[in-house]
Image (cartoon, helix red, strand yellow):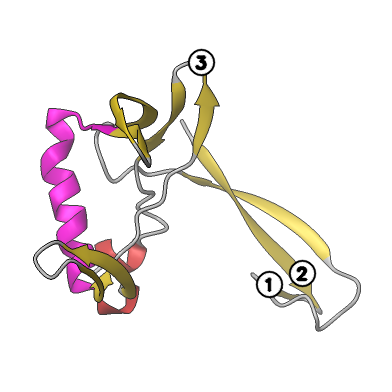
């Protein structure tokens, strides 16, 4: 079972997640919440040296998506698409116009580490941290 810590501060007898400016004497309390994965199996990512390097393009990124996680991953992306409060504006390259342009997008983040064969990590969102998507 995976667990993730949540940090709470005790301020003047009340629990608060962030505001520590109220009282200079703050007690840190750690609570443990169960990690509930969105996907049945995590997506593995890695970045390795390219087999066919060109100038400025010497790395290859690979996503290994388990077949039984595809439907859950699509559902997660569709929920993100509908959650306008999670959208940001970012720049992408328009190949037809040969220029960068600004578009709405969502960001997926995953931790990783460096290894003998390059950088790698796993992606599996925590349902608790995505409760605004899944508790409707």
From the viewer's perspective, is the residue at label 2 or at label 3 nearer?
Answer: 3
From the viewer's perspective, is the residue at label 3 or at label 1 nearer?
Answer: 3
Quarter of the image with the C terminus is bottom left
How many neighbours does mark 3 have within 10 angstroms: few (below 14), some (14-19), or many (20 or more)?
Answer: few
Q: Where does label 2 land, which residue?
A: 10
Q: Is residue 105 above or below residue 76?
A: below
Give the percent coordinates (x, y) of residue 70.
Answer: 13, 39
Give the percent coordinates (x, y) of residue 132.
Answer: 33, 69
Where, by quadrant of the figure, is residue 131 drawn?
Answer: bottom left
Q: Nearer the viewer, residue 130 or 45?
A: 45
Q: CA distance from mark 2 to mark 3?
A: 44 Å
How many neighbours does mark 2 have within 10 angstroms: few (below 14), some (14-19), or many (20 or more)?
Answer: some
- Give the total number of marks visible in the rendering: 3
Give the percent coordinates (x, y) of residue 23.
Answer: 86, 80
Q: Is residue 52 above or below residue 100?
A: above
How many neighbours does mark 1 have within 10 angstroms: few (below 14), some (14-19), or many (20 or more)?
Answer: few
Q: Where does label 1 land, which residue?
A: 15
Q: Of callouts 2 and 1, which one flags the residue occurring earlier in the amino acid sequence?
A: 2
Q: Of callouts 2 and 3, which one flags the residue occurring earlier in the amino acid sequence?
A: 2
Q: Which mark is residue 116?
A: 3
Q: Are marks 2 and 3 in contact (CB under 8 Å)?
A: no
Q: Are marks 2 and 1 in contact (CB under 8 Å)?
A: yes
Q: Write the residue at 34% across / 42% down.
A: 124
Q: Is residue 125 above or below residue 77?
A: above
Q: Is residue 106 left or right of residue 17?
A: left
**Is label 2 in a helix, a strand or a loop?**
strand
Q: Is residue 44 visible?
A: no
Image: magenta residue range: 62-83
Verify whether residue 66 appears in magenta: yes
């Amino acid at each position: 079972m995976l667990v993730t810590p949540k940090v709470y501060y005790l301020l003047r007898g009340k629990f608060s997640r962030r505001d520590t400016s109220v009282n200079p004497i703050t007690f840190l309390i750690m609570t443990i919440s169960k990690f509930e994965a969105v996907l049945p199996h995590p997506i593995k990512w890695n970045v390795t040296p390219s087999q066919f390097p060109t100038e400025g393009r010497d790395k290859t990124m690979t996503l290994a998506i388990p077949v039984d996680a595809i439907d859950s991953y699509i559902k997660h992306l569709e929920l993100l698409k509908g959650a306008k409060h999670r959208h940001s504006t970012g720049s992408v390259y328009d190949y037809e116009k040969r220029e960068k342009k600004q578009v709405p997008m969502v960001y997926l983040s995953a931790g990783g580490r460096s290894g003998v064969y390059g950088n790698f990590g796993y992606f599996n969102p925590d349902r608790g941290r995505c409760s605004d998507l899944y508790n409707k």
